[in-house]
Image: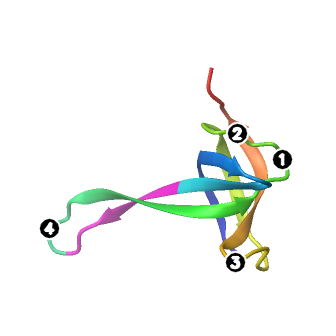
Amino acid sequence: MKTLSGLVVSDKMQNTVVVAVAKWMKHPKYDKRTKKTRKYHARNETGAKVGDTVTIVEVKPVAKTVFFKVVGVESGGKK
């Protein structure tokens, strides 16, 4: 069961948010660190909005592209 933390970048769907999860990768030869970002669709039952930092956890498929659920809102929101 995966647990990831990321930033909500879209909340325009009903009951679903798009969460961008960033991680740092090191190049195997050149040792340069680069930031890689991946977007996940997550079921939103906590009321997270764009700009919030959230924790998502893997669940059984809810829809065609939704495999995660928001379990906690850590900070945020636009002001």
The quarter of the image holding the N terminus is bottom right
Instruction: Return the residue found at the far left.
Output: 30
The residue carrying pointer 2 sits among few (fewer than 14), some (14 to 19) or many (20 or more) residues within 10 Å by Cα, namely: many
Residue 37 falls in which quadrant of the image? bottom left
| The residue stretch that appears in magenta | 21-28
The residue carrying pointer 4 sits among few (fewer than 14), some (14 to 19) or many (20 or more) residues within 10 Å by Cα, namely: few
**Residue picked out by circle 2:** 49
Q: Residue at x 27, y 58 (%)?
A: 33
Instruction: Return the residue found at the far front.
Output: 13
Are the two marked residues, 3 and 4, in contact with CB atoms closer than 8 angstroms? no
**Residue picked out by circle 4:** 30
* Residue 22 x, y percent position in the rendering: 46, 55
Looking at the rendered structure, the kind of residue marked 3 is Lys
Q: Secondary structure at mark 4?
A: loop
Instruction: Return the residue found at the far right.
Output: 45
* Residue 34 x, y percent position in the rendering: 29, 57
**Residue picked out by circle 3:** 64
**Residue picked out by circle 1:** 46
Q: Residue at x 60, y 37 (%)?
A: 51
Looking at the rendered structure, the kind of residue marked 1 is Thr
